Amino acid sequence: MALRLGTENKRQVYLVAGLFTIILLVGGWQIYGALSGPSTPPPAQVATAANIHPIAGGSSTAAGPEAQKLSNADIDPFLHFDKLAQSEDVEYGGAGRNIFSAESAPIEIEQPVKNARAEAALAASVPTGPPPPPKPPAIELKYFGYTQAGDKSLQAFLVHGEDIFMARTGEIVNHRYKVGAIRPGSVQVTDMAYNNTQTLTVVAF
């Protein structure tokens, strides 16, 4: 006995049948395209400025100037044996020690003969101790004559600037100079400020 289908049931059956037909057509088309397509894989997609996406958080615009593009047109990939042989034939021709040989002895350099005079001058110029004390100043007195007293003792005539002094042995001249031994041609005078004794000879005016 045949079943009677309502109007709603007929619509559902038609819809299912249409969807099934579409699925069959799409699946058959994909299978046909896979079987009839070229055997070689499609070329890899070249990255262009359109499909390059910036890193998250970065900027899509350039952050600096364009980099320099290099060309390999002038690069010679071939090996030239003639030029390589020329570099291998170079020989070390130095006049001194061969730095590439462990058996090469160093050159003996003649030592200059020492000069005794130069060594003595160098030794004299090098100070060996503390500097000597400064020389005391010259005594600012002039001895221009003497006189003999009744006891035959001598008295010296001394000049200091425009002042004239007559002094015996042991006396002090100008609060600084002590007269020592008096002789006709010389007199000993001690500078008490520097404890320096000098012999003054007679001078003519």
Image (cartoon, rainbow, N blue to C red):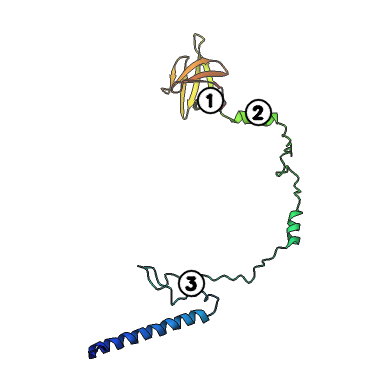
Q: Earlier in the sequence, mark 3 or mark 2?
A: 3
Q: Which residue is mark 2?
A: 120
| Residue 133 versus residue 35 in the image, above or below | above
| Residue 106 vertical position relative to residue 31 in the rendered view, above or below | above
Residue 186 vs residue 10: left or right?
Answer: right
Figure label count: 3
Q: Is residue 205 above or below residue 14?
A: above
Q: Where residue 60 sits in the image (x, y, percent)?
A: 39, 73
Q: Disc 2 residue type? A: Ala
Q: Nearer the viewer, mark 3 or mark 1?
A: 3
Which residue is label 1 attached to?
129
Q: Amino acid at mark 1?
A: Gly
Q: Nearer the viewer, mark 3 or mark 2?
A: 3
- Disc 3 secondary structure class: loop
Who's the residue at 58% across and 30% down the image?
A: 126
The residue at 74%/61% (across/down) is: 81
Query: Which x, y percent locates residue 162?
Result: 46, 30
For this rendering, which residue is in front, 167 or 98? 98
Rounded to the nearest angstrom, the CA distance separating label 3 from label 2 is: 74 Å
Q: Quadrant of residue 145?
A: top right
Q: Residue at x 50, y 11 (%)?
A: 153
Q: Amino acid at mark 3?
A: Glu
Alpha-carbon distance for marks 2 and 1? 17 Å
Q: What is the CA distance from the residue labelled 3 to the residue labelled 1?
A: 74 Å
Q: Helix or strand or loop: what does disc 2 sit on?
A: helix
